[in-house]
Amino acid sequence: MNLIGRYFLLLLSVITLVSFVQVGENFLQNNDNYVHWGERDLKWSDFQGPVPDDSKFHALTHSAISLDFQSDGVILEFKIESVFDPSKSWKKEGVNSYILKHEQLHFDITEYHARLLRKEIKTTKYTSFNTIETQIRNMFNETYNEANQMQIDYDKE
């Protein structure tokens, strides 16, 4: 199979008025510690990252959308997953079940946007073989912006 693209793009995650984007081909392959959306609900023991001294928040969920796609010029194959990174997610002492539900919903927002991206990639009529990568990157970036805004709005509410 002649591959034009094989990418892992990690989208967003984030919660609490902060956003992260990471790009790296081996990001998911090298980390078995991720919680994949749908496996189970988050638990406080999943939040293993260091707590910043200056944060006004009680917890932070670092979730992401992983996108892997490849094409042989005729068939476009893609895999999109929502993942939670325990090493970058943290909680302060004294958090309660209400805050955990709040953090779970941040992860759910990431999955919601992963589903929107899956649908858009699946239903798009691509202009040409040469533009597939650009079109998918544009869809991904648009999804990132929309998801980030929803995460921010959720925290404000």
Image: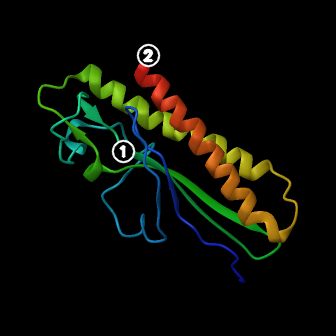
Horizontally, residue 109 falls left or right of residue 132, namely: left
The answer to whether the residues at label 2 and label 1 have Cβ atoms under 8 Å apart is no
Horizontally, residue 99 falls left or right of residue 156, namely: left
Q: Residues within 10 Å of mark 1 (few under 14, many from 20)?
A: many
Say which residue appears at 44% left-offset and 71% top-offset: 26
Type of the residue with mark 1: His
> Which residue in the protein does label 2 denote?
157
Say which residue appears at 81% left-offset and 71% top-offset: 130
Say which residue appears at 62% left-offset and 49% top-offset: 141
> Which residue in the protein does label 1 denote?
62
Helix, strand or loop under label 1: loop
Can residue 114 be seen here? The reply is no
Work out whether residue 21 or residue 59 is closer to the camera in this orientation and state it. Answer: 21
Say which residue appears at 69% left-offset and 53% top-offset: 138
> On screen, 134 above or below 148?
below
Task: Compare marks 2 and 1 and give the one earlier in the sequence.
Answer: 1
Work out whether residue 36 or residue 109 is closer to the camera in this orientation and state it. Answer: 109
Residue 133 appears at what percent x and percent y? Answer: 71, 65
